[in-house]
Amino acid sequence: MVRVPYIDMEMLAPLPDDPSPYNPDWMSANNIHRAMANHPEALRVFWPRIGAWMRFKSTLEPRLRELAIIQASYVTASSYEFAHHVHYAESIGMTHDDILAIIDESNGKTSNLTELERTVLKAARDLTLKVQIDDATWAFLDAHLRRENLIELVLVTSYYNHIIRLVTALQIGIEGGKEHETSLAPYLERYAPPSDIGVWR
């Protein structure tokens, strides 16, 4: 059960130094935003200025970005981020087989993804679990990505590791019910959590 109340955006007063509404295009009725509304200033900083930039202004290929995010979400068994980003990944053309490939790579199996995609997964996995990227992985990515895109890959993976820990610590639940068009819970039934963790968190 969530550890803080969910607060609707329209209940928040504007910040004195930033009087724009709390529900512009970058904001949503998602539970993560409603939980973070308990700290309006942090909400204002982290989502529109960092998260929205990563999704809408970063030049890293969206498929590579989502591979990294889903990889980090999967190996940490983050139910909220995994479900949300598998759902979003479908909207940019990723398939069920792509998600299974991420799971295979996480379990030490070789998938049919490209070498670049598999190396992106390794970098995201190692950064998430080992807090570093080894020299060989970095050298390969440096040879195949523009330097700014490689930095963006590290930023995206690191940022979503922050989000993963936030939703897990606050026990933020997946949306569902009348106010949401789609329940994301079936994604957690479709894909098994990592065997070393055993359950979705």
Image (cartoon, rainbow, N blue to C red):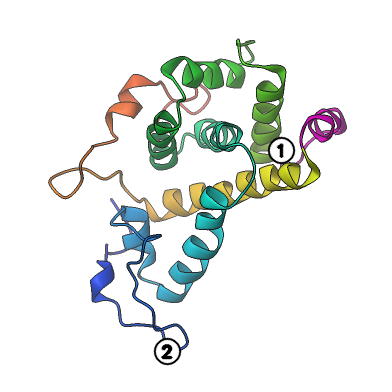
- Looking at the rendering, which quadrant does residue 175 occupy? top left
Secondary structure state at the residue bearing disc 2: loop
Q: From the top left corner, tell me how far across and down residue 76 is, in percent.
A: 52, 36
Q: Are discs 1 and 2 less than 8 Å apart at CB?
A: no
The numbered disc on residue 148 is none
Question: Is residue 112 left or right of 1 when viewed as pictured?
Answer: right
Q: Name the residue at 38% across, 78% down.
A: 20
Q: Residue 194 vs residue 180: left or right?
A: right
Magenta highlight: main SS? helix
Amino acid type of the residue tagged 1 in the rendering = Lys
State which region is magenta.
Answer: 131-145
Query: Which is nearer the eye, 112 or 175?
Result: 112
- Percent of width and height locating residue 81: 44, 41
Q: Please state the horizontal and vertical placement of residue 45, each as a whole percent of the image.
A: 51, 69
The residue at which mark 1 appears reads as: 130
The residue tagged 2 is 16
